[in-house]
Amino acid sequence: MIREAVLELKRDFLYIKRYIKFWVFLLSISGTLVLYNQYYFKVNKEITELIQIKNQLTAKNMMLKKEITGLSSPDRIGKIAQKKLGMKPVDYSNVRFIDQKDMNGKK
C-alpha cells in the first residue's frame, strides 16, 4: 500500500514536472498583462487630468486676453488721461505741424 502511494506520487510529480514550464509561462504572461493594464489605466488617468488642466488654462487665457483688450481700449485710456492726469483732447486747429526742414533750421 505504501509502495502504491509512492508510485502514484511519483507519477503525479512527473506529470507536474512535465507541465511546470507551461504553467510558469502562463502565469508570467498573466502577471505581465495585469501590470501592463494597471500602468495603462494610470497613464490614461494622467492624460485625462492633463487635458482638463489644459482646457482650464485655455479658458483662463481667453478671459485674460479679453481683459487685456478691455484695459487697452483707447476710450478707457482717454478717460484715465483726462481724469487722473488732467489731459485734454487734442484740438487740431491749435496744432502746428513742423516739417523736417524746419527742424534743421532751413526754410
Image (cartoon, grey):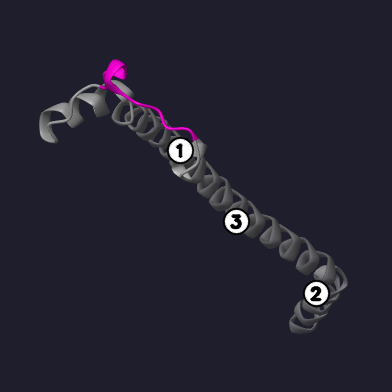
Locate residue 98: give its quadrant. top left
Mark 3 or mark 2, whichever is nearer to me: 3
Dot 2, how many residues are within 10 Å of its Cα: few (below 14), some (14-19), or many (20+)? few
Locate residue 68: give its quadrant. top left
> Disc 3 to disc 1, how far (Cα)?
77 Å
Near-viewer residue (65 or 54): 65
- Mark 3 touching mark 1, by CB under 8 A? no
Q: Amino acid at mark 2?
A: Glu
Question: Which residue is drawn at the image coordinates 48% and 41% (left, top)?
Answer: 54
Q: Amino acid at mark 1?
A: Asp
Near-viewer residue (29 or 107): 107
Residue range corresponding to the magenta coloring: 90-99
Query: Of label 3 and label 1, which has the lower sequence position?
Result: 3
Horizontally, residue 78 falls left or right of residue 53, namely left
Near-viewer residue (25 or 1): 25
Q: Is residue 74 above or below residue 1?
A: above
Tell me the element at label 3. Answer: helix
Query: Of label 1 and label 2, which has the lower sequence position?
Result: 2
Residue where numbered disc 2 is placed: 8
Mark 1 or mark 2, whichever is nearer to me: 1
Horizontally, residue 70 falls left or right of residue 34, namely left
Question: Which residue is drawn at the image coordinates 75% and 61% (left, top)?
Answer: 29
Q: Amino acid at mark 3?
A: Tyr
Residue where numbered disc 1 is placed: 102
| Image location (x, y in percent) of residue 6 | 78, 82
- Mark 1 touching mark 2, by CB under 8 A? no
Residue where numbered disc 3 is placed: 39
Query: Of label 3 and label 2, which has the lower sequence position?
Result: 2
Q: Total marks drawn?
A: 3
Question: Which residue is drawn at the image coordinates 83% and 71% (left, top)?
Answer: 21
Which numbered tag is attached to residue 4?
A: none
